C-alpha cells in the first residue's frame, strides 16, 4: 500500500479514478525548472533564518540538482500518484537525501508554490515574447525603409481609396506590434512580485524572510496580500490577453498576405521556403503559413475566455479550479512563439511586386479626392468641387484611362479653374499627404526614425 505525501488523515486508499482526474503532473511537469528554483531559494532562506541547518541545506541543494538532472536526462519517473510536479520533486528529493527533504516544505504550501512557479513561467515568457516582437518590428521597419516610394492602393471597405506607400502600410503594423511589446513589458513590471512564503493562504508563524526569496528569485519584492496571492491568476490572464491581441494583429497581416498573394492581387510572392503545395493540383502554391497564424488566433481567444470563465465567481482563496489555469497558457505561449518566428521569416523573404501594386493603384481613380481638394483650395465650394471631379472621372472612363493618367489639357477642359499647377498623378498625391503621421515619404521617414529609435532604446 503506497502512502501519499498528503494522505495522513485518510483511512482508505484513494481510488485510481480520483488520481487520474485530480492529477496535473502530466502537464505541470513543464514547471519543473521553476519548481526547483523556487525550492532552492526557499531552502536558502530557511537556512539563513536558522530554520534549516547548513548540512540539511547542502543535502537539499545536492538532491535538487540530482532531481533536475534526472528530469533533464529523461530518467525521472513521473507517477500519477504524486499528483503534481511539486509533490513529485519533493518525493524524489526525499528518496535521495532522506529526512532533510521532508523539512523543505516548512513554511510553504503547494498553494504559494504553484503560484510562484507559474508566475516565474509567465514572467519568463513575457520577456521571451517581447524579445521576439522586437525582432518582428525590426523586420517590418527594414521592409518599410526600402519602400517609401512604392505605391499601392490604400483601402477602406477593401475598396480602392487613396494611394499610400508600402512603407506606410508596413509601419502601421510596426505600430501595432510596438503597443503589443509595451503591453507585455507593462504586465511584466506589474506582476514582478513574489508569491513565495504566502503558504496556504494566511502566511506562516515561522520567522521567514519573503524579501530574501523574492530577491533570490529575481522578483522586485514580495506580494502584499497572501490571501489574494494564492488565489488570483490575473498575471496569467494578462499574458493570455496580450497573446490574443498580438495574435489578432498577426492575423490581420496574415489575411493581407493571403489576399495579396492571390492571382487577382499578386502584390507579393511568398517564398517557396514558406509556401506549401497541393496534394492533387500540381500548379498550386498555398499560403498555409499565414492561414495557420490566422487560424491559431481562435485558440488564443479560446484560452483567454477559458481562464476568465474558470476564475469567475471563485471564492477566496485557493480552489482546485485554478489547476485549470496552466494548459491554456502553455498552449498560447508555445503557439505564439513559433507563430512570431515564422511570420518573421515569411516577411523577411517576401517578394514585393512593385509594378503590380502600381498598376492596381491606377484602377479606381484613387486621386479623385486630390482633384476635389485642389479645387477646394482654389476657393471652389467643396460640393461643387466634388461635382467637377465626378465629371473628370467620367471623362477618364470615356477615354479608358485612370484619372491619374489624364493629361493637363484634358483636366483643364473640364473646368477653367483647373490651373497649370494641377497634378493628379499618384506620386503627387502621395507626396502631398504630408500631414503629421501621413503617407508622404517625408512623414514616413519620421516614422522610420521613431521606430528605429524605439528599437535602439529597447535593445
Ligand atoms: N496542482 C495544483 C495546481 O495546479 C497545485 C496546488 C494544489 N494545492 C492544493 N491545495 N490542492 O493548482
Image (spheres, rainbow, N blue to C red):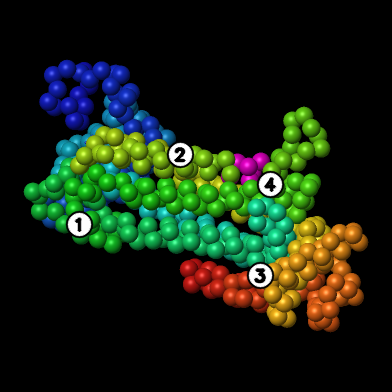
Mark 2 and mark 1 in contact? Answer it, CB < 8 Å.
no
Alpha carbon separation for disc pair 1 and 4? 49 Å
* Quadrant position of residue 275: top right
Q: Does residue 99 appear left or right of residue 160 in this picture?
A: left
**Residue 445 seen in this snapshot:** no
Residue occupying image coordinates x 25% and y 39%: 314
What residue is pinned by disc 4?
Answer: 258
Magenta segment, which residues?
288-293
**Most foreground residue, 424 or 170:** 424
What residue is pinned by disc 1?
Answer: 224
The earlier-in-sequence mark between 1 and 3 is: 1
Q: Does residue 260 appear left or right of residue 5 in this picture?
A: right
Residue 226 x/y as whole percent: 18, 50
The earlier-in-sequence mark between 2 and 1 is: 1
Residue occupying image coordinates x 19% and y 36%: 98
**Most foreground residue, 16 or 229:** 229
Alpha carbon separation for disc pair 3 and 2? 36 Å
Which mark, by number, is residue 302? 2
Which mark, by number, is residue 439? 3
Q: Does residue 407 appear left or right of residue 139 in this picture?
A: right
The earlier-in-sequence mark between 2 and 4 is: 4
Amino acid at each position: 500500500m503506497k502512502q501519499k505525501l498528503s494522505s495522513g488523515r485518510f483511512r482508505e486508499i484513494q481510488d485510481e479514478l480520483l488520481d487520474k482526474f485530480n492529477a496535473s503532473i502530466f502537464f505541470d511537469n513543464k514547471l519543473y525548472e521553476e519548481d526547483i528554483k523556487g525550492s532552492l531559494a526557499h531552502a536558502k532562506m530557511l537556512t539563513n533564518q536558522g530554520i534549516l541547518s547548513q548540512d540539511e541545506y547542502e543535502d537539499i541543494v545536492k538532491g535538487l540538482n540530482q532531481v533536475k538532472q534526472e528530469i533533464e536526462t529523461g530518467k525521472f519517473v513521473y507517477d500519477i500518484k504524486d499528483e503534481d510536479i511539486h509533490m513529485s520533486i519533493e518525493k524524489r528529493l526525499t528518496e535521495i537525501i532522506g529526512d532533510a527533504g521532508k523539512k523543505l516544505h516548512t513554511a510553504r504550501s503547494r498553494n504559494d508554490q504553484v503560484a510562484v512557479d507559474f508566475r516565474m513561467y509567465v514572467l519568463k515568457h513575457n520577456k521571451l515574447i517581447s524579445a521576439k516582437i522586437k525582432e518582428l518590428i525590426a523586420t517590418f521597419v527594414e521592409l518599410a525603409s526600402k519602400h517609401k516610394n512604392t505605391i499601392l492602393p490604400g483601402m477602406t471597405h477593401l475598396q480602392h481609396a487613396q494611394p499610400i506607400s508600402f512603407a506606410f502600410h508596413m509601419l502601421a503594423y510596426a505600430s501595432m506590434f510596438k503597443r503589443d511589446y509595451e503591453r507585455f513589458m507593462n504586465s511584466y513590471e506589474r506582476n514582478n512580485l513574489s508569491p513565495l512564503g504566502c503558504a496556504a493562504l494566511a502566511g506562516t508563524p515561522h520567522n521567514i524572510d519573503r524579501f530574501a526569496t523574492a530577491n533570490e528569485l529575481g522578483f522586485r519584492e514580495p506580494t502584499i496580500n497572501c490571501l489574494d496571492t494564492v488565489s488570483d491568476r490575473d498575471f496569467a490572464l494578462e499574458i493570455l490577453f496580450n497573446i490574443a491581441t498580438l495574435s489578432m494583429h498577426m492575423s490581420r497581416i496574415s489575411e493581407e498576405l493571403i489576399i495579396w498573394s492571390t492571382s487577382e492581387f499578386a502584390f507579393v510572392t511568398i517564398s517557396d521556403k514558406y509556401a506549401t503545395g497541393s496534394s492533387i493540383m500540381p500548379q498550386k502554391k498555398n499560403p498555409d503559413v499565414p492561414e495557420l497564424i490566422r487560424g491559431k488566433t481562435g485558440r488564443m481567444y479560446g484560452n483567454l475566455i477559458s481562464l476568465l470563465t474558470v476564475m469567475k465567481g471563485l471564492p477566496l482563496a485557493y480552489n482546485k479550479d485554478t489547476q485549470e489555469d496552466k494548459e491554456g497558457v502553455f498552449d498560447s505561449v508555445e503557439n505564439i512563439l513559433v507563430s512570431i518566428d515564422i511570420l518573421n521569416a515569411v516577411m523577411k523573404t517576401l517578394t514585393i511586386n512593385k509594378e503590380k501594386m502600381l498598376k492596381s493603384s491606377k484602377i479606381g481613380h484613387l486621386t479623385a479626392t486630390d482633384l476635389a481638394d485642389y479645387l477646394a483650395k482654389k476657393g471652389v465650394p467643396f460640393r461643387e468641387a466634388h461635382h467637377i471631379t465626378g465629371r473628370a472621372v467620367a471623362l477618364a472612363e470615356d477615354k479608358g484611362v485612370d484619372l491619374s493618367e489624364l493629361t493637363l489639357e484634358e483636366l483643364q477642359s473640364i473646368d477653367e479653374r483647373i490651373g497649370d499647377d494641377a497634378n493628379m498623378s499618384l506620386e503627387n498625391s502621395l507626396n502631398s499627404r504630408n500631414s503629421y503621421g501621413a503617407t508622404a515619404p517625408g512623414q514616413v521617414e519620421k516614422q522610420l526614425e521613431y521606430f528605429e529609435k524605439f528599437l535602439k532604446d529597447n535593445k
